[in-house]
Amino acid sequence: MPKMKLNSLDTVLEMPYFNVYSAMYENRETSHIAQYDIVSRNKGLTMQNLGRNLPVSAVAILPVDPVNRRILLTREFRMPVNDYLVAIPAGLVDPGEDVRAAVIRELREETGCVADRVMVLPPAFSCIGLTDETAACAIVTVREQAGSEQEENEEITSRWYSYEQALAIMTDPQVRTGARAQLLVLFWLAQEGMKVL
């Protein structure tokens, strides 16, 4: 039996793209009660479905060109940090949309690239200290590049980098990036035989 027991879950805030819930947990051993706030993309969370069988919320895409030993990275203005970050294409899965279709759509919208081969990894939690959001990461080879179809509130540019350049970018402490992008790039480079440690 788990030491922590969920006693209640209340909706605090509902927004178009996320919701905030307040959970009350009890330590069964000490009877200590603690409040924990949770951000979720899911509406209508209950004590019964918290963290269980929820739809995949987002995709993160690593576009690669193994023949020419390069990786496509984006430079994107991210509002939560009020700055530009080096990143990988990513986005939300539309209601009723298949995860693979979301990967192909988001890649096209943000970079103008058309996916060739797509490998979707099993979904994983994005940031378990804050949210129940799940994201499916994908590694994609690109067939061609046309124009992007960004939304009005997006500012994204993309560029191919050699493996060596991508490694330098993702290990440079001066470069602002996200953990998911760093790990996927380093994973791919290690897979391709580069020394990343």
Image (cartoon, rainbow, N blue to C red):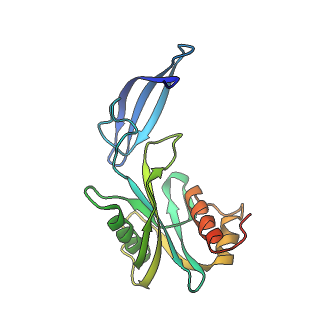
- Determine the image quadrant of residue 171: bottom right
Residue 195 in view here: yes
- Determine the image quadrant of residue 181: bottom right
- Determine the image quadrant of residue 29: top right
Residue 150 in view here: no
Looking at the image, which is closer to me, 38 or 196? 196
Q: Position of residue 45 (x, y in %)?
A: 33, 35
Q: Position of residue 65 (x, y in %)?
A: 53, 81
Q: Residue at x 68, y 71 (%)?
A: 167
Looking at the image, which is closer to me, 85 or 4? 4
Q: Is residue 94 above or below residue 74?
A: above
Q: How many marks?
A: 0
Q: Residue at x 66, y 66 (%)?
A: 170
Q: Is residue 70 above or below residue 43?
A: below
Looking at the image, which is closer to me, 12 or 186? 186
Q: Position of residue 180 (x, y in %)?
A: 55, 58
Tell me if 49 is positioned left or right of 75 in this view.
Answer: left
Quarter holding the C terminus is bottom right
Q: Residue at x 33, y 31 (%)?
A: 48
Q: Residue furthest front?
A: 1
Q: Residue furthest left?
A: 96
Q: Position of residue 83 (x, y in %)?
A: 56, 59
